[in-house]
Image (cartoon, grey):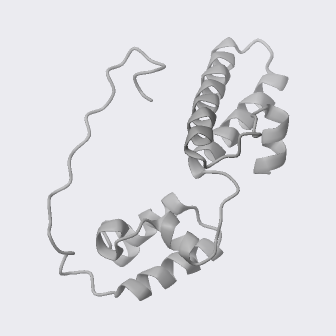
């Protein structure tokens, strides 16, 4: 969403190399990788942080390529469900922090605009997740509900 709320052109992303088989340096089996993912989640790590830890500590470049499943689908297979998607939860945390800041600093117009932009992103994601069936149709965003859901 870089282009949506700024005048910048965004960043150009690089493409991954095409490979037919997993890298030779990955010595862990798929069961071991799944155990590591579940263990890290039980320690309180988010799915994005689990991916970073697998890359940096265990040398697994892409979980989906090596195991055949994403981190969230591995967790779902082990019976772990999420109450909210991770991206909308992170945006709600950001909105809560901005709202607390704006209660103290009432004349901070720059962060007021940032708060409105974050709320717009949340509402856009809410519409998308309702359409795809991830969130129930009765779900509605408000800052007070976000405080209850996230904290």
Q: Quadrant of residue 97?
A: top right
Instruction: Tell me residue 57's x, y (percent).
Output: 39, 74
Q: In which quadrant of the rendered image does the N terminus lie?
A: top left
Q: Nearer the viewer, residue 60 or 77?
A: 77
Instruction: Tell me residue 107's x, y (percent).
Output: 76, 11
Q: Is 151 drawn above or below residue 147 in the view shown?
A: below
Q: Is 3 drawn above or below residue 83 in the view shown?
A: above
Q: Nearer the viewer, residue 121 or 95?
A: 121
- Residue at 68% x, 12% y is 109
Q: Quadrant of residue 8?
A: top left
Q: Quadrant of residue 61?
A: bottom left
Q: Is residue 17 left or right of residue 148?
A: left
- Residue at 59% x, 51% y is 86
Instruction: Tell me residue 22's x, y (percent).
Output: 21, 75
Q: Is 132 drawn above or below residue 106 in the view shown?
A: below
Q: Nearer the viewer, residue 111 or 116?
A: 116
- Residue at 15% x, 57% y is 17
In the rendered picture of this protein, how many numbered marks are placed on residues? 0
Instruction: Tell me residue 119's x, y (percent).
Output: 66, 27
Q: Is 45 drawn above or below residue 40 in the view shown?
A: above
Q: Is residue 69 left or right of residue 129?
A: left
Residue 59 visible in the shown view:
no
Residue 144 visible in the shown view:
yes
């Amino acid at each position: 969403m870089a282009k949506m709320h700024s005048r910048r052109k965004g960043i150009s992303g690089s493409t991954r190399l095409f490979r037919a088989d997993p890298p030779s340096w990955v010595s862990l089996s798929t069961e071991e990788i799944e155990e590591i993912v579940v263990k890290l989640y039980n320690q309180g790590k988010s799915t994005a942080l689990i991916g970073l830890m697998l890359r940096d500590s265990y040398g697994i470049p892409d979980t989906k390529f090596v195991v055949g499943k994403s981190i969230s689908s591995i967790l779902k297979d082990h019976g772990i469900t999420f109450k909210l998607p991770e991206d909308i939860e992170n945006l709600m945390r950001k909105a809560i922090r901005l709202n607390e800041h704006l209660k103290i600093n009432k004349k901070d117009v720059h962060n007021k605009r940032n708060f409105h932009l974050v709320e717009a992103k949340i509402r856009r994601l809410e519409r998308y997740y309702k359409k795809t069936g991830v969130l129930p149709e009765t779900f509605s965003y408000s800052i007070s509900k976000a405080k209850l859901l996230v904290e």
